Amino acid sequence: MPRPLVSTINRTEWITDIQLATTNTQVALPTNGGLIPNDRFIKKMYLQFEGRIANAGSNNPTGTQADLQYALLDTILVQGLHRGRGQFEQFINARGPDLRELALIYQTRAPFSNLSNLSLGINATNDFRFIIPIDFTPMNCSLAQQVDWLLDAPNYDALKLAINYGDDQSVFTYGTRGVPTFSAFGSGTGNPRIRVHCEFAQAGQSQFAGFVPARLWRYFYEDTSSDVTSTTTNARMANIPRGYRIRNILVKSGTKSAAVASGNNSYNTLLNTMLQNLKVMRGLNKSIRFYADQFAAREDAAEAYSITPDTGYTLVDFAQHGTWHESVDASGLAAGPAGDTDFYWQSDTAGAANQAALFLYEELRGLPIAP
């Protein structure tokens, strides 16, 4: 397929800041009705959180959640109405810590964060600055192939970024909670903020006229059932999406905190020993990936990308060699005998209270359309 001639794929520009005046709320871009700029194609977005949490004068934190400060960006959504396809698409629906981990693995380095050890003392201050990248193309594929998956923002109506913003309980653990103070980075006043940058792609005079890229979707399913809270053999933990291509599945395992504010999510512990006999099943009793335990599965991604995932994370990547064409084609699994079309994740589990397993899917929908 002929691709448009591209003059640049990553022209980075600061868009605006989102002021975080209230915790436990959904926020959006403050300009143009919350719309993402839609005058150019977009490769990537960066969310840079900056803010301070000042502990109270009594009943200070006793520890930290496993998701740390990254859980402040509880859920990140990118969505809009694609005019050409005539449908509303929420193609990014993922939690901040998990998007960060995905970027860590594929970039072979952790996205920037200024703090790893948080202060728990009375009246102590923690000034957080960290970045969560959101790539709209399949990461670690060739530059030419990434053009096929650029976000064609000009073809969307009401293209929006929405972020569910948490609070200190997603970051810290308490015996008795003394409510802390949120303020601007390095200051006792003002608000935390999220600085939003985008990497724009440009195609010179053609401006991508007539070119419609395919669309990458990232969204998740979380299993909190008896599959993971009880010791189980051959548990069917998650149905893997069918009808398109699956590039990867990022699996997160651990215990969820029960002490977060209503509607928020944070893992209190992350575990490498919760799952055994990890299988991706395509059809009845047919495994296309089979790992004896999480250590073997984690090493698969570590060898491919030269970085070991953080504790509790396992990446099953079906396209490790720079081309999205290696992805599992599940488009033919949409109809037919159940034994031939089934597609799911199966594991043995070592059960315990409050355990959960999260499956973040990277799905490739459609094919690019050239003029």
Image: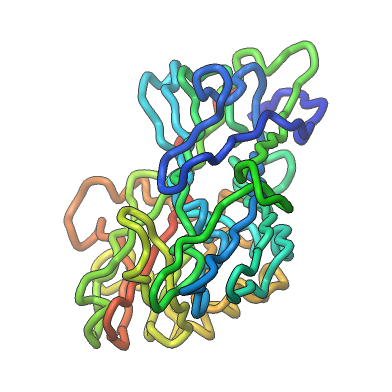
Give 283 or 360, whichever is nearer the viewer.
360
Is residue 6 something one can see in this rendering?
yes
Q: Quadrant of residue 123?
A: bottom right
Give 70 or 323, whichever is nearer the viewer.
70
Say which residue appears at 38% left-offset and 65% top-offset: 358
Say which residue appears at 60% left-offset and 71% top-offset: 301
Say which residue appears at 22% left-offset and 84% top-offset: 230
Where does residue 264 sit, x and y in percent of width and height? 37, 56
- 140 to the left or right of 317: right
- The vertical placement of 91 against 94, above or below, is above
Is residue 248 something one can see in this rendering?
no
Q: Residue furthest right?
A: 7
Q: How many marks?
A: 0
- 357 to the left or right of 320: left
Q: Quadrant of residue 104?
A: bottom right
Where does residue 1 sit, x and y in percent of width and height? 63, 30
Q: Quadrant of residue 70?
A: bottom right
Where does residue 132 sit, x and y in percent of width and height? 63, 51
- 66 to the left or right of 224: right
Where does residue 130 sit, x and y in percent of width and height? 67, 55
Say which residue appears at 32% left-offset and 53% top-offset: 263
Give 302 or 178, whichever is nearer the viewer.
178
Identify the coloring: rainbow
Question: Which quadrant holds the C terminus?
Answer: top right
Give 289 or 154, whichever is nearer the viewer.
154
Q: Residue furthest front?
A: 57
